[in-house]
Structures are given as structure tokens and as C-alpha cells.
Image (spheres, helix red, strand yellow):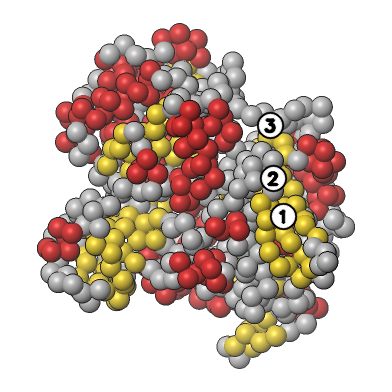
Amino acid sequence: MIKYENVLTTCPYCGTGCGLHLQVLDQQLVGTLPAKNHVISDGGLCIKGWNAHAFVNHPDRLKKPLIRKNGKLVEAEWEEALALVAEKLGKIKTKSGPDSTGFLSSAKCTNEENYVLQKFARVVIGTNNIDHCARLCHASSVTGLAGSFGSGAMTNSIPEFETDTNCFLIIGSNTSETHPLIGTRILKGQKRGAKVIVADPRQNQIGQWADLYLEFRPGTDVALMNGMMNIIISEGLEDKQFIAERTEGFEEFKALMAEYTPEKVEGITGVPAEKIRQAARLFAMQKPSAVIYAMGITQHTTGVDNVKSTANLAMLTGNLGIPGGGVNPLRGQNNVQGACDMGGLPNVYPGYQAVTNEEIQKKFGEAWSCAGPTQVGLTVTEMVHEAGEGKIRALYIMGENPMVSDPDINHVRHCLERTDFLVVQDIFLTETAQLAHVVLPSVSFAEKDGTYTNTERRVQRVRQAIPPVGEARQDWEIICQVARKMSAAGFDFKHPREIMEEINRLTPSYGGITYERLEELASLQWPCPATDHPGTPYLHKGKFSRGLGKFFAVPFKEAAELPCEEFPLVLTTGRVMFQYHTGTMTRRSPKLEQEVPEAYVEIHPDDAVRIGLNGNKHVRLTSRRGVLEKVHVHVTDRINPGVVFMPFHFAEAAANILTNAAVDPVAKIPEYKVCAVKVEAA
Ligand code: SF4
């Protein structure tokens, strides 16, 4: 009988963090099976999880380092590539200073790898210029929820949706397509009797099962939530005891909410006043109620305002510090939570310890035997822009693909091409890697040990199932090798377990999350400050991280770019179930790629008539920043008139050629969800 080895690990796709077994035969990956009794996935997986193994042995895998010679990337030996990286980074630091180099860490890589890269940036180069794609998805959550509660993470846990929540407000989240196993938990909660309210500019998949569906004009989230809160206050449905005992700023907030009458909000959002009343009453009266949101809330120039409105709504109804309630931002990538936790951000060390705090500077200075940088560094969009200006001279990118994921890609290309030295560490020759001076081949999730932290702060093991493909190396190992070539101390780790031990010592919320405990308990949710602490399923019980929860009086503001005569439609972007992010892995997984193999744009039948589509199968899309010449068109009433939708996974018709790089003034997240476009029959 054929004997398979099944290696228990964590799904490499979305932030849900499902458990799966990689099936191995003679050191070859042959399949994926769900993990029975897993705390999140409980024996289930979505189609991406079932195909998690499919890209690992794709012939496109990078197997040797590449160095650009005479304009072409050619294969090289590791020794030559590492020496070149060390030499160039050293020279640029000496000549132009530490802040002339920038780093992108990775929401796909493990906690240990992200920890080592931020340590390299701060210790070896001496810069806080480190960021990653959390900036592009949930920077507004981190900033907004930290302002309201003192902690920027999802407050509650996924299993509570099935067992405790009585009302869901899902706003700006296509949950059953983007986080399918969370969608399943919500629908099981609905079967138990919970009510589901879905608010979205597009009739998304989970909206089909909603008890109440609110289809609103893109960019009017604050007005919609203010309208709900106006009704809750005017009908006396607020939780007066919770407000009095646990919050501050209520009176100023209440005064502003009085302005957002349901009729006025109907005029702004397009949602009938009566539906807003129904939603408000359901949410306030069916406790515990949970707000669930994703990038429909965060990716706006008003992203922080949107997030603060979700926090206001939860505090107003006393839905915090209890199981089944809370404010629940669903993080996109498998380890975007962990990459933030590990300090892959320009303003904080691991565990959100501020780089500007002198005590913290001293703590890390002593632990790392060096005085680290004290100024807040640049965000990803700032780094890319400054590369175009010649101020950032070197960029080191680990497992990210800004040539598809960032807004206004034409500008990104211009900036990356101007960089003196671009290093990309990845598993495939991505659109970004194609522009690099040196490409370092790293291993996939199936070839590494480490940990990921899912959207509900749950830390789980990633386990190596097969040897590295070709000459690919571990990301942490590559960074340590470059560090040692630059004569840096503190990069002698032999295994990710040793990196976690350093994380335990320096990161209070991870103090009790050790490999030994993860073997025994399978997972732990932070904060978990000591090895006798059980972890924390829901936050803010009895007291907020900042003491009192803070109400913010948030007025409605329009998006940065509105439709006009020349660009009369609003483009909003998002994901589809079968593809993931920039498609690097899913597009090399045959079963996933065959489901949705190309980009498309959804347009309402009325708009199709207006532009004279006339049965044409393709359209040209134009914004102020670029043109997509030939995009497949779907005519559907899933979308409102005046709005068009495009998934952003496809490099050959990249929606981000069109999107607006205008950012939220505080979180610096770009406004992917609203830009003005013209659509013509092609
Ligand atoms: Fe993987 Fe997310 Fe699907 Fe779970 S829901 S199997 S974590 S992609």
C-alpha cells in the first residue's frame, strides 16, 4: 500500500487561518487534506485551501539566484548574489545614509521571517523605512481602532460567530468569497437564529443570504453608519450603562449624530430611510451584535473615519468586551496580522512598541546591542514615490508584488525603474522581480517551519513538508546571511524556534507563545504575556486597552475623486473566490486559474445601454492615470447604475493601472475603492 505522510500546517492564502494536511509521497507534495477538529476550519477548506499544494512545484519556481547583467537577469551562484547584495546595501548606506534604503516585509511570510527583516532594517541599515501590504489593506484598522480602543486588532474570535453572535453587520466585506470559512461560520450563526445585515455597494455573494441588504453609493459608509446611530440614539436604544461606565466623548459625538437623520442619509447613500431604521433597530436590539468589515471600509481616503464609525456603533450599543460582539476587521493575507505584530511597520517595533518612545528605544537598543533609528520611517507608498524622486536609492522587497498590488501602477513602474538597487526575494519571477537587479529565490509555505497569526490574533504553526525546491532558501536564512556578510551580530539563528524565543523576550503580547505550547495546544491568541497565560479570545473585557473607549464625532466626507462629465462612472475593486491577491500563486494552480482566468468588469444593464455596448464583449476603461484597452465585460444588476466593479488579481489587465493613489491623511492607505472612470465599447 502506498504510504503518504500527512504534515499538519496552516493555509497560505487568506487570514482565516484554516488547518490543512499536506500529503507527501517520497518527498513530493501530492495533495491537500482538511484538518479534522481544527478550531477554525473544523474539517473544511475552501477551494483555495484544497489547492494549497498546487503551485509549489510549478515549473516557474525560482531555483537559483538571478543577477542583472547587461540588462538581463541571468542565473548566478548564491555566494555571488549575497556578496553583491551586501556590498551594494553597504555602499548606499555609507554614501547616502541609512534612510536612503527601504524594505518591504511580507504578509505571506512567517512571523519569524518578518521579525528578522525588520531587525535587519533597524540594526544593520539603521532605518525605520519598513512597511508591507497591510498599509494597502488594513492600515486604517490599525490606526482607527487604536484611537478608539487602544488596540488595532480584531476584537473577537471566529468560532463565536457560530455560537454567540445574534446580529451581524457585514459592511464592505464579501465574506463568503474572500474569507469563505468565516462566511460559513456566519451562516451557521444565522441558522441558529442570528440576523445578518449586509451593507455593500455591490450585491456580493453573502448578500444573497442576508436578512437585510443595504446597497449604498461607494464612499458613503460614514453617512450610513451615522444614520443608523442617529436612529439608535433618537429611539433610546443605546446602551446607557456601557456608555457611562466605559467610554468618553459621547456628548460631542451625540450632537453630531443628531444631524444625520435617516432622510438626509438616504439622500447621501441611496439607501431608503426605512431600511436604515430596520438595520439600526436590529443591530441595537439583537445583542450580542458584531460588526464585520474588510477592505470596503478601509481602502478609502476616509478609511480611518470609516473604522472609527464602526467602533462608535459597537460602543453605542455596548457590544464590546463580550463574546459574539465586537469590531472585527477581517485581515486579507494569511499573515498580515503577524507581519504587523512583528514590527513590519515604520512606526513600531514588534508588539506595537513605538519607535519614538525612549524607553522602548533603550529596551531594543540593549537587546540588539545597537542604538536603533528614532524617527518614524516611510510607508510603502512613500518609499515607492521617493524612489522615483531619487531619494530612496535601494529597495529590498521580500514576498510582495507592488507592480500589481499598488495603486497607479504606471507611476510605480517609473519609480522602481529609477531605483539604483532593487532586491526582490520571492518564489516566482513576479512582475516586480522582473525589474530587480538581484532576485533571491526563497521557499514556499510547504518548505518552511514557522508561525502565522490569523485575523483573530491566533498564532499557529507552519510545518515543513518537503525539502526546498531547487536551490531556494528560507527567507530568514537569506536575510541572516546578508547580515553576516555585512559583519552584523545577532543574526546567528539556526531555526525559526530560536527567532521565536527572541520574539518572546521582546514582545509582551507574544511572551507566552512558544513552540512547545503550540505543539501542545495547537494555537494561542494574543495577548498571551506569559507561559501560564491561556491566550485571549476576545479583547477589552471590563476595560479597553486605552482605559476608556473613545467616541469620535466623525462627519461624512466625499471620496477624493468623484464622477464628472469626462469620467462619469465610479470604479470599485475587489477579489474573487478563486484568485488571490496578485495571483502569483493561484494563477499557477490549474484548477483555480480555470475558474476565473481573466480580468472582467461588471456594469449595470442601464449603463451598458448608455455607453452603447450593443452586445460587445469587451470595453475600454480609462481613468486620469491610465487605460485598460480590452477588458471582458459582464452586464449584471449585481452592481448599481453608475458603478463598475473589477477584480484586481490580473497583471495583464491590472485594475490598479486605473486606481487613485490618493491616501487617507493619517493611515496613508490608498483609495482603491473609489475612482472615476470612463467606459467605452472596445
Ligand atoms: Fe485557506 Fe482562507 Fe480558504 Fe481557509 S478560507 S482554506 S484560510 S483560503
- Viewer-proximal residue, 125 or 532? 532
Task: Please state if 502 lies on the left or on the right of 113 as rendered.
Answer: right
Task: Please state if 46 lies on the left or on the right of 36 as rendered.
Answer: left
Q: Is residue 220 above or below residue 286?
A: below
Nearest to N terminus: mark 2 or mark 1: 1
Q: Is residue 373 above or below residue 75?
A: above
Q: Quadrant of the N terminus?
A: bottom right
- Residue 21 got which mark? 1
- Residue 224 got which mark? none
SS for callout 3: loop
Amino acid type at mark 1: His
Q: Residue at x 17, y 63 (%)?
A: 608
Task: Please state if 518 lies on the left or on the right of 136 as rendered.
Answer: right
For disc 1, the neighbor class at 10 Å (few under 14, some 14 to 19, many from 20) is many
Task: Please state if 354 lies on the left or on the right of 567 as rendered.
Answer: right
Q: CA distance from mark 2 to mark 1?
A: 10 Å
Q: Residue at x 60, y 58 (%)?
A: 50
Amino acid type at mark 2: Lys
- Residue 527 got which mark? 3
Q: Residue at x 32, y 24 (%)?
A: 280
For ligand 1, tell me if the residue under mark 2 lies within 8 Å: no
Q: Is residue 680 above or below residue 119?
A: below
Nearest to N terminus: mark 3 or mark 2: 2
Task: Quickly name the residue at label 2.
Answer: 36
- Viewer-proximal residue, 590 or 612? 590
Nearest to N terminus: mark 3 or mark 1: 1
Instruction: Indicate the quadrant where residue 13 lies.
Output: bottom right
Residue 407: x %, y % from top left:
41, 61
Mark 2 and mark 1 residues within 8 Å of each other at the beta carbon: no
Residue lying at the far front of the rendered structure: 1
SS for callout 1: strand
